[in-house]
Amino acid sequence: MSTSTTPAGEAPLQFVDPRRFKANSQVAVDDPHLRRSFRSAMDFLQVKRAAHFGDASAFDTLRQVGEAIRQYSLSRLPDLLERLEQRLVERGVQVHWASTPDEANAIFLAIARRHAATRMIKGKSMVSEEIELNHRMAEQGVSCLETDLGEYIVQLAGERPSHIIMPAIHKTKEQIGQLFAEHIPGTPYTDDVDTLVAIGRRTLRDEYRDAKIGVSGVNFMVADTGSLVLVENEGNGRMCTGVPEVHIAITGIEKVVESLEHVLPLFSLLTRSATGQAVTTYLNVITGPRRPGELDGPRELHLVLLDNGRTQAWRDADFRPTLQCIRCGACMNHCPVYARIGGLAYGTTYPGPIGAIISPHLLGLEPTRDLPTASSLCGACSEVCPVGIPIPDLLIQLRRASKHDVDPGRLPLAGQGSAKSGLEALAWRGWAWLNEHPRLYRLALACARPLRSLMPGWQGGWTVHRTPLRVARRGLRERLAERETAR
């Protein structure tokens, strides 16, 4: 069965540049429909999560376990990766290392060429989005078809996922019905959710059988057993990894843990934090390709391990907690900024709070320097993070890194100091100097007060949503002195 889906790469991409984040955010804020949709979805997800973490002390205990596992795994990352590779190779898995998205895409293309494959069928994988696999393969004549229903919808729309767990959360049922009617032959318009799900399932079913290569992500890699663990709800991941003759899994190097015992608490934290489920429908543990005598599974299994800036975060003890993330999306669901602008405004694979702290390592600080500022630092993201990532602290560090040169004795981040302003630095040095000389500080205030009416009405970003700053008529010292006199 052939569908007329439009794999990305054959149509103009509607991806946005993270450099346009502020402009994109304004457009999103001005869209009342988008704001209502996201507010409703975020409220729903928050309630579902809260129902599974009703006991705060139990959650804190489990979170401490998850955080300890992730910190332990990262502290031994090089050793665990070497052990993982050894175990995988022993089980017949071909392991590939990629430093950049280009290297990762070259590996995929080489495997496709070797098998004369012109079609890949894909389960959900944010890392494949990170390397823009669909579009890079399309340029070489190899189409990639998404089978996760949300990913399939945004692929038809030519968009990025707007959420790492629910890619099409920004789409209404009416918009999805219109997409299906336009792109799937013989499909009449409907906005009935059950009917739309059935259409997607029916359209994709035969694609599993016909594709030579199946692609998936990986939630956890187990070094001791050489196992790849995939968590999913739709069953498409199991089909992509088991039906085609060749399975290619791709993931970031930070996803490794030491043993299967370490997976269990992380799995419990992931499912309840992400979708408010005690367990997901499917938990797949893959340990090698099809063995002699087995009837199911791929005959060839590849694992692509992607760096793409992760070692930059890992080498710095201050930024290493960024890599603890298990991609549950809870920080997005509780973020007041994300709830108002959605994911597409960020222009990055990972939006929201987690995107604001990891994207500067993946893409560099220069194109992403505005993302760490897209936070009220309310701490909601850190409170719900199931593995204890101190997101507000990391945001502050990235803000500083974008505006200042690297401190002596430390390695610079890519794009370090790209937002540095000589005028701003001069202003702060002047402010610091005045505060170090109290008499001059009081003299400056005395001279400024008569001129307070001359303060400009426009004061940069401050006055976009705030009234202009003016020197007070009376200082704090004077007010306190008056209060003491009144007593």
Image (cartoon, rainbow, N blue to C red):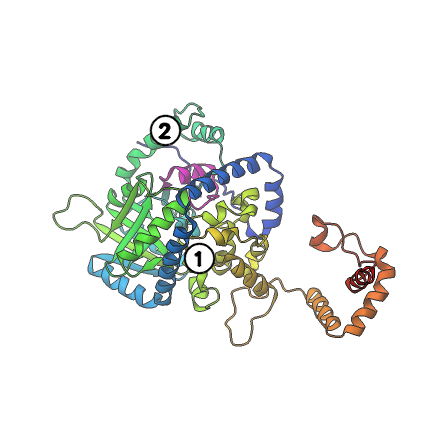
Q: Residue at x 47, y 30 (%)?
A: 173
Of 390 and 346, the residue lying toward us? 390
The local crowd at label 1, few if under 14, some if 14 to 19, many if 20 or more residues have their Cα within 10 Å, is many
Q: Name the residue under label 2.
A: 199
- The mark that comes first in sequence, 1 or 2, is 2
In the orientation shown, which residue stands out farthest toward the right? 450
**Residue 477 spot, x, y in % from top left:** 78, 65
Q: Quadrant of residue 485?
A: bottom right
Q: What element carries label 2?
A: helix
Range shown magenta? 145-165
In magenta segment, residue 294: no
Q: Residue 388 carries which label?
A: 1
Give the quadrant of the C terminus.
Answer: bottom right
Local SS, label 1:
loop
Q: Nearer the viewer, residue 158 or 440?
A: 440
Task: Name the residue rendered at 72%, 66% in the picture.
Answer: 427
